[in-house]
Image (cartoon, grey):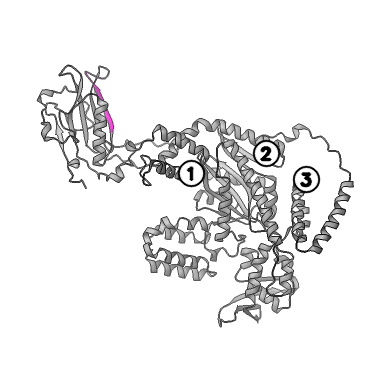
Amino acid sequence: MMSEDPEHLLVVYDDHSDQRSLSLDETSSTEESPNETKLSLETTNDTIPYIGQRFATHDTAYEFYSEFAKQCGFSIRRHRTEGKDGVGKGLTRRYFVCHRAGNTPVKTLNENKPQRNRKSSRCGCQAYMRISKTTELGAPEWRVTGFSNHHNHELLEPNQVRFLPAYRTISDIDKNRILMFAKTGISVQQMMRLLELEKCVEPGYLPFTEKDVRNLIQSFRKVDLEDESIDLLRMCRNIKDKDPNFRFEFKLDANGRLENIAWSYASSVQSYEVFGDAVVFDTTHRLNAFDMPLGIWVGMNNYGMPCFFGCALLREENLKSYSWALKAFLAFMNGKVPQTILTDQTLCVREAIAAEMPAAKHAYCIWLIVAKFPSWFNAVLGERYNEWKNEFYRLYNLESIEDFEMGWRDMVNLFGLHTNRHINTLFASRTLWALPYLRSHFFAGMTTAGHSKAINAFIQRFLSAQTRLAHFIEQVAVAVDFKDQAGEQQTMQQNLQNICLKTGAPMESHAASILTPFAFSKLQEQLVMAAHYASFQLEDGFLVRHHTKLEGGRKVYWVPREGHISCSCHHFEFSGILCRHALRVLSTGNCFQIPERYMPLRWRRVNASVKVFQNSLSDHGERVRLLEGMVSNLVAESAKSKDRLDMAMEHVSVLLERIREHPIPVPVPVPASRYARNDVFT
């Protein structure tokens, strides 16, 4: 609707001496008769164009009409220029029109070129201002000879019109600030907030948007990216020369420019051998300094801390790029496919995993879904948002698929969300995120809120600074090394803590001597709860339920001769830790040790799995890192008492003396050509 404010009046003026149609497609050129154009200045609002209004230059006329348009709720553009007696004989007439004037021409479709399918804003609006050049008083000037303020579309409010491209400008000073911010690696959102604070304006009231800033940063990158890519490849080759176990792979486009690159470290490959059963492939971040999508592979080690597996920088976010990244990752990891892989809700990532890792169980990261809830449901649910969120978490944590689906229907009815597209999308993809559908697959506890925060904090560490593309790979290495060192300290702290046995059961002390403190604490929780359950033997197994319940329960199957036990709750399959139901049956059956197969290698202390490690490790550097872990464990265990410390010092002194006496073999020179590679380095 048009406003009735004087500045928004629908007015149509035209110089009648100029026998012209108001059509914007008309192309004739007729000389105006300015003497016949009269309009009293006293009766005209100076902010509204009028016939006969004079301007020294056509640029001045454009600026005046542009300011008028901004007040009314639209923007303008230059439509057509005409010269006397034809083009090239001197400019005599100009047309300025509404930004929605005209109609978008139909584009010729090219099957080989992807179409963006952007909707045009043009709708044939007839609002315009025409100015003509005259020399009536000797000096040349421009007069308004035609004006229409009739629009066939909605005009924008003042708080909306400022977002039109014509009114969004970035000053040279702001451009320099943005370039400086981009080099420090901060996000565009952080840039906007800093500029708002510097200019003392409310959030959202800068004369430009986040999109404008992203486009500006992209223009900076076009200049530097090619040189940066060359430096990045040179950096990778230098690292490879120093550490032959460093692995990287890259892809060049048809013009020889870097398209994708992925890399991993020797320590990451080693960690993946043991902890690569459950992997997070996080593709939600970008390298802000160069606007490149970033893919990061992360897992969880036996002490419950994040471990880095690999990284990929991509030019595009599409199926082809993600498929390439997954292939490169599998090549680094000697073809070993993870049991489960967690990602964002990106369709092309899902398709890439289905194509490259069909044997892996793919699921969505619940914490990435929950992070979108405020923007999805806060406005829709209002005061009931927190109530709905609590109900969502209750449904998410259910064990039974039937209970989940029935509860979901009740939740939709209760909150009136039948037509909400986000609710419908979540339900359609429920098998990829809801725990009732995932409990039979191993996720190493990475679906919990605590571990998701730890993983995100770990990733943020090497996203905090991105001054140069070539230096980013070093930043990742520093962050990973820092995390490894911090992990060793946390590991030592865990081992130094005196483990408190709560049940006195032989199974508990047995597990405490084998599992890491992190894993043992999870098992201990189940052992404590097992005492509250009763078991009833059936023909084909056991029924286990809480002592206060008269119905329900979990079905446990136990074959003592084979050391096999399983429960219908699938807790072991999901977490690698036996559940309270299975532990209750083992206790009832006079089992004093947890069967070997139910204390997985990935949850054991280093000294409890040395032999397995040694069988899989042949590289010198890997063995050194293994020894460092053993020494850390030795110090941790020895520090628990004076007797242990004295014993350790005595034996280590003897061992150190024997090692010093052992001869060191002379290394055989390695030909330089041994490390020659083409495009793939492994």
The quadrant of the image that shows the C terminus is top right
Q: Earlier in the sequence, mark 2 or mark 3?
A: 3
Residue located at (59% from left, 43% from top)? 312
Tag 1: amino acid:
Ser
Horizontal side of 202 relative to 180 (left or right) equals: left
Could you tell me which secondary element the residue under label 3 belongs to?
helix
Residue 475's x, y, as percent? 61, 42
Residue 241's x, y, as percent? 71, 35
Question: Does residue 246 lie above or below 301 as drawn?
Answer: above
Q: CA distance from mark 1 to mark 2?
A: 32 Å
Question: What is the quadrant of residue 235 in the picture?
Answer: top right
Q: CA distance from mark 1 to mark 3?
A: 41 Å
Question: Dot 3, how many residues are within 10 Å of its Cα: few (below 14), some (14-19), or many (20+)?
Answer: few
Residue under label 3, please give it.
620
Of circles 2 and 3, the one toward us is 3
User: On residue 681, which mark appears?
Assistant: 2
Residue 550's x, y, as percent? 56, 83
Of circles 1 and 2, the one toward us is 1
Q: Earlier in the sequence, mark 1 or mark 2?
A: 1
User: On residue 187, which mark appears?
Assistant: 1
Magenta stretch encompasses residue 78: yes
Q: How many marks?
A: 3
Q: Are marks 1 and 2 in contact (CB under 8 Å)?
A: no
- Magenta region: 77-86
Horizontal side of 624 relative to 150 (left or right) equals: right
Question: Dot 1, how many residues are within 10 Å of its Cα: few (below 14), some (14-19), or many (20+)?
Answer: some
Tag 2: amino acid:
Phe
Of circles 1 and 3, the one toward us is 1
User: On residue 648, which mark appears?
Assistant: none
Q: CA distance from mark 2 to mark 3?
A: 19 Å
Residue located at (70% from left, 77% from top)? 587
Q: Are marks 1 and 3 in contact (CB under 8 Å)?
A: no
